[in-house]
Image: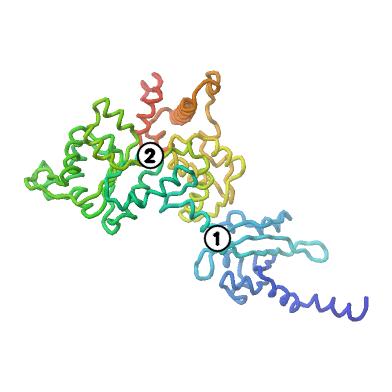
Amino acid sequence: MSENEKDMWDASRDPRWTSLILDSIGDGVFTVDREGKITSFNRAAEEITGFSREEAIGQYCHEIFRANICFEDCPLRRTAQTKERIVNLEVTILSKDNREIPISISTAQIVDEQGQVIGAVETFRDLSLIRQLQEEVSGRYRFEDIVSRSKAFSRIFQVLPDIAQSDSTVLLCGESGTGKELFASAIHNLSKRCKGPFVKVNCGALPETLLESELFGYKRGAFTGAVVDKPGRFKIAEGGTLFLDEVGDLSLGTQVKLLRVLERKEYEPLGGIKTERADVRIVAATNLDLEELVARKRFREDLYYRLNVVRIDIPPLRERPEDIPLLIEHFLHRLNRKMGKQVRRLSDKALQILLDYTYPGNVRELQNILEHAMILCKGVEIQPRHLPAYLTRRTPLTSPPRSQTLAGAEILREKEKEAILSVLQRSSFRLSEAAKDLGIHRSTLWRKMKRLGIEKPRSVAKSQ
């Protein structure tokens, strides 16, 4: 080795030379000792995190990066203990001013001349710009809080602003859990009434007498216990939008009074003698076939036509499987923020399980499944073991396969029946518990059981 080469070699081992090289790199780089304390911190690391080199050196890395992954599955600790190199793992950290910053990290061991581990090094790259571009692209598949890339939803998205501006009554039709409330909220937010209140009433959750007083209010002395005047939802929603969910469950008596409001824009509170005006837009939703109910004399035909001015049919999740990966990404992001976690993805097997499932509870059930999984997941990847048991230990059908002879709709019916039976068996046919697992209302589950011909076993019915 020549004298010049020897001088260059000695200079390259100078800590000042190393610091100069690291500061010229665009990625953040820092090193830790065997205790996990930061021993070096380059300029890019300062710019990304907001912490100065003086503030970072000597601190434990989790005190600077403040990500849940530091405590649950620290990449640096794993690398130092197992020699496993982490490459391009996406996590989110908190900057000095508490902003969430998405980064991609890679790790490696640091060993001395004797081969002993003396620490670890981590390089990380700011993904904020990339995430921003991803959000702009995914924005093509979003409308308000509704997430979809299906053609059916794309057509709805195109006409929804015009529907919202019309001030006409809207009827949203779709199974439980398809997002009818989100559509109702979007219609309100895009309407001329957006500055007014958005009031929700679940018509299937209240008995007839209570529902009537909830809708129209009551006057003092109208009944025992009515010691003061109470405004109804129509009064509260004045100048805004009233969302009537599960409108198919209304009694015939309440239907008559609702029809009067739609026709004359007026109503009378219980016990009142003065007619009140209703400046309210109605958006109704149902998971029942109202035309069938009309034919069976369980729903007034004149009310049906009053509600069915503009109709939006929302397809169930099983008919738009292309939305499942997009919804998973959407819910993971939302649940991470809600639960303070850093779950980034599903394993291939877990994802396949969710893609193969038929979702009788639709989008709401998918959200509940992911929330269940994230509670159990301690790392960054959801595995099949984190999913609800009914998805991974499903009861097989004892009858021979009929998929070759059944029409498409009948196949879906069989799969829905199989999925609901599995949940019911797991909960010993306790409807409230099964409905909660499916993410649907108890009355909705009961109606599905009637439609699919599912009955409680006699032994279970007697024990309950």
The mark lying in front, picked from 2 and 1, is 2
State the residue position of label 2.
Answer: 313
**Quadrant position of residue 34:** bottom right
Q: Do the residues labelled 2 and 1 touch (CB within 8 Å)?
A: no
Q: Which residue lies furthest to the right in this view?
A: 1
* Element at label 2: strand
Q: Which residue is drawn at 22% across and 55% down?
A: 239
Task: Name the side, left or right, on which 95 lies relative to 158.
Answer: right
Residues 365 and 268: in front is 268
| Amino acid type of the residue that numbered disc 1 sits on in the rendered structure | Leu
Q: Residue at x 44, y 31 (%)?
A: 427
Q: In which quarter of the image is residue 14?
A: bottom right
Quarter of the picture holding the N terminus: bottom right
Q: Mark 1 points at which residue?
A: 133
Q: x%, y% of residue 17?
A: 76, 78
Left or right position of 265 against 112: left
The span from disc 2 to disc 1 (Cα, nearest Å) is 32 Å
Q: Where is residue 230 in the image (x, y as percent from the top left)?
A: 15, 49
Of the numbered discs 2 and 1, the one sitting upstream in the chain is 1
Q: Is residue 287 above or below residue 58?
A: above
User: Where is the C terminus found, in terms of image quarters?
Assistant: top left
Q: Disc 2 residue type?
A: Asp
293 left or right, relative to 259: right
Q: Residues within 10 Å of mark 2 (few under 14, many from 20)?
A: some
The answer to whether 284 is drawn above or below residue 125 in the figure is: above
